[in-house]
Structure formats: structure tokens, C-alpha cells
Amino acid sequence: MSDPVLLVDDLTVAYGPATILHDVTTTVTSGEVVAVLGANGSGKSTLIKACLGLAPVTHGEIYLFGAPITKPAQVPFDRIGYVPQRAAAISETPTTALEVVMSGMIGNWRLRPPRGAKARAMEALEQVNLADRAHHPIRVFSGGQLQRTLIARALVRTPELVILDEPLSGIDAHSQELLLGSLHQLHDAGATIIVILHEIGPFNGFLDRSIVLAQGSISHDGAPPEPHGHHASDSHVHQHYPHGDDAPPALAPDLSWG
Ligand SMILES: Nc1ncnc2c1ncn2[C@@H]1O[C@H](COP(=O)(O)OP(=O)(O)OP(=O)(O)O)[C@@H](O)[C@H]1O
């Protein structure tokens, strides 16, 4: 069996009196492509954030590449590319797209981008079809262009684990195809991919597995929805599971490092 890239054991996340996730246990092994699905508010983003040390773990344990998330200095964050859910907050800064993407090569105590960073950042911007906007400040970008910049920032470090929170939202079909192409390339090179989705869309056929959250706990962890199921929202996820025993019951901007 492959090494676990991510291990979540009996996780509870609470914000004050509100328990957002409970009894969450799962493992993602090297090279898997896993979708995290579920209705709005079911806890998908919170799960991903907890896995990255960005949400409070009230109970349970999380390991990334074998390192406990409670000891961030041991976690190899430079092997991870994270695309947060649409982040409007950074769009007011005077930073250019190229600078944002180059910041993706800083991390784990490295404060300067490595040699060749600029050329690599330009390549990453080409991958998301934004090379011609490299020197434009991101504050003038549309939501979709900003999203693509953040995708480039995550991919520029050639991550071994890519975590994307609704990466398709607000980006056009051509950019979606480019993103899928880049993810396929990373996957062919051995990367593990965890992606929160509302629509399976172009991820059809690429997923090995899906984890469905319902009201803060896992209601399904297994086969992805059938290819004809394009919608990952509650009723559709329910409809498209082939095996009754597997079927989930009716389902109920952070920039961490850079
Ligand atoms: N920082 C926070 N403080 C308090 N409650 C929070 C916080 N972050 C998330 N929540 C709550 O946790 C629940 C799950 O939110 P989360 O963003 O994880 O859901 P989601 O499944 O990703 O939803 P969506 O599909 O709408 O993006 C929601 O009820 C939300 O209001």
C-alpha cells in the first residue's frame, strides 16, 4: 500500500460552541485524486483548512506526510500547493500577478524565491493563460483572473500534494481545461490531488475517490459519482451512487503561506 499523504483520525473542529466537523476519519494515499463533496455548509472548506493547520482542531489528529499538524515546523509545506476558495482580500494590494506567483516558491523558512523563480513563475502564468497580464497589479483583476493567479501560485512549486478549494468556480471553460491539463501533468508525475467541488464537470473520469460530507461528518468515502452525474450537490450525489450500501444518506480567503 502507498504511503499516506494525509491521515485524519477522529477529527472534531469547533468554533466556540458550534461543532463544524465531528468523527472525521480518512486517509489519502500517494497518487490518489480525491474529491471532497457535500452541500453548502457541510464542512468541506473547514476540513481542508484543518488539514493545513488553518482551523482549530478540537479533538483528533491530522498528519501530513507523516508529520503532525500540531507541529507545523515539521510539516513540509513546501511540498504542498494550496488554492484557497476565492480570496477577495488580497485583490486590494498593489502586487503584480508575477509577484504573487513567485511568492508560491517561498516557504518553510525560505524568504527569497530560488534561482530561476521568475522564469518558472512566467511558465505557471502561461499554464493558466495569464502570461500577458504578468506585470499587472492583481487589484485590477477579475475574480476569475485572480483565481487563476492563485492556481498558478500553487502549481509553481511543483507540489507533491495539491489541495484546491472549488478551483473551477468563476473560471471560463478554456481556463478550466488548462487547469485540468496542469493537474493531469502533476498527477502523472506522482502528485496527490484533493479537490473540493460543487460540479464534477471536467474532473469526470479523473477522480479515484470521493469523500462526501453531510452536516460535518463523512457520509460516503469511496467511489466517485458516476460519469453522467455532473452535479456534486446533495441530491445528485445521492442519485448517482451505484451501490445502495455505499450511497450517502440525503445530504444534509485564507492565504496561509506563500
Ligand atoms: N471561522 C468560522 N467561525 C465560525 N463558523 C465557521 C467558520 N468557518 C466556517 N464556519 C461555519 O462552518 C460551517 C461549514 O463551513 P464550510 O465553509 O466548511 O462549509 P463548506 O462545505 O465548505 O460550504 P460551501 O460549499 O458553501 O463552501 C458553516 O456553517 C460555516 O458558517
Image (cartoon, rainbow, N blue to C red):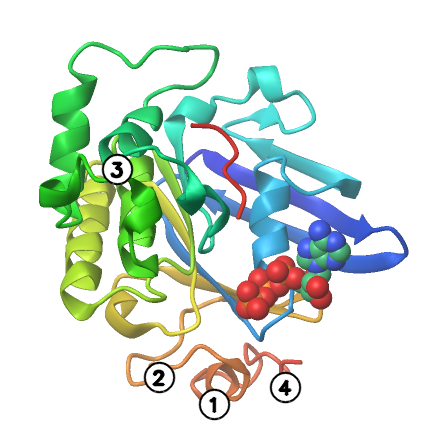
Q: Is mark 1 within 8 Å of ligand 1?
A: no
Q: Earlier in the sequence, mark 3 or mark 4?
A: 3
Badge nearest the viewer, 3 or 1 = 3
Q: Is residue 160 left or right of residue 177?
A: right
Image spot of residue 158 (x, y percent) = 26, 31
Residue 239 tag number = 1
Q: CA distance from mark 4 to mark 2?
A: 16 Å
Q: Earlier in the sequence, mark 4 or mark 2?
A: 2
Name the residue tied to disc 3: 97
Q: CA distance from mark 3 to mark 2?
A: 35 Å
Q: Amino acid at mark 3?
A: Ala
Residue at the extreme right: 17
Tell me what residue is drawn at x 41 percent, y 46 percent.
91
Q: Are marks 3 and 1 in contact (CB under 8 Å)?
A: no
Q: Amino acid at mark 4?
A: Ala
Q: CA distance from mark 3 to mark 1?
A: 41 Å
Name the residue tied to disc 2: 229
Quadrant in which residue 142 is drawn: bottom left
Classify the position of ligand 1 by quadrant: top left, top right, bottom left or bottom right.
bottom right
Q: Is residue 80 above or below residue 130?
A: above
Name the residue tied to disc 4: 250
Q: Is residue 113 left or right of residue 42?
A: left
Q: Is residue 155 left or right of residue 75?
A: left
